[in-house]
Image (tube, helix red, strand yellow):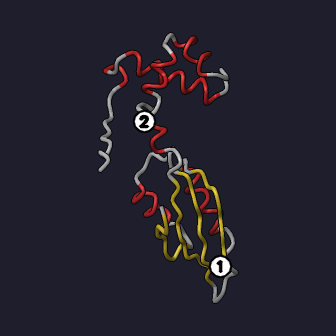
Amino acid sequence: MPKQPKYYIIEASALPEVFLKVAEAKRLLSTGEVSTVNDAAKRTGISRSAFYKYRDAIMPFQNIMKGRVITFQLMLHDEPGVLSALLMVYAKENANVLTINSIIPTNGYALVTISAELSEVTVSLEELLNELGQTNGVIKAEVLAG
């Protein structure tokens, strides 16, 4: 049976220099500042073998949350400005709205799903959900997936 990896959050100053250089080499490659591992290794002062040895073992903390997409389901009153007010909440909390889907409103209500990437959000998911639910015109707000 394969061993499950363990993860730790460690302050960068406590890491051996090679890990920081590998992280920088990965950044250089991902931003296109260099096009090859050889160039990244030379620029950061590490060997290619060190890069390959540690490349999967280190990443900046914010990248761990990158791609955290949550889909919210919201029941709204069919009134002008309600969706706009919701989008302002997402913007205020630095959520990146990826998709908005709505069925045609019936009986004065609209069911809307919004998928958002939350890596830059500084409040908890529960706080964001509460804020969405308290927005004027929102009847119900819940997490559908994520």
- Identify which residue is drawn at 62% across, 79% down: 110
Q: Amino acid at mark 1?
A: Asp
- SS assignment at label 1: loop
Q: Is residue 85 above or below residue 55?
A: below
Residue 80 image offset from top left, x and y in percent: 69, 72
Q: Amino acid at mark 2?
A: Phe
Q: Quadrant of residue 10?
A: top left
Residue 35 image offset from top left, x and y in percent: 67, 23
- Identify which residue is drawn at 49% across, 38% down: 63
Indicate which label's residue lies in the foreground, 1 or 2. 2
- Residue under pointer 2: 61
- Cα–Cα gap, marks 1 and 2: 41 Å
Q: Is residue 63 above or below residue 50?
A: below
Residue 42 image offset from top left, x and y in percent: 57, 11
Which residue in the rendered view is the most extreme toward the front? 1
Tell me the crowding category of disc 2: few under 14, some 14 to 19, or many 20 or more residues within 10 angstroms, Cα based: few
- Residue under pointer 1: 78
Residue 117 image offset from top left, x and y in percent: 55, 52
Asked if labels 2 and 1 touch by Cβ distance under 8 angstroms, the answer is no
Q: Is residue 15 above or below residue 70?
A: above
State left or right for residue 95 relative to residue 21: right
Q: Is residue 50 above or below residue 85?
A: above
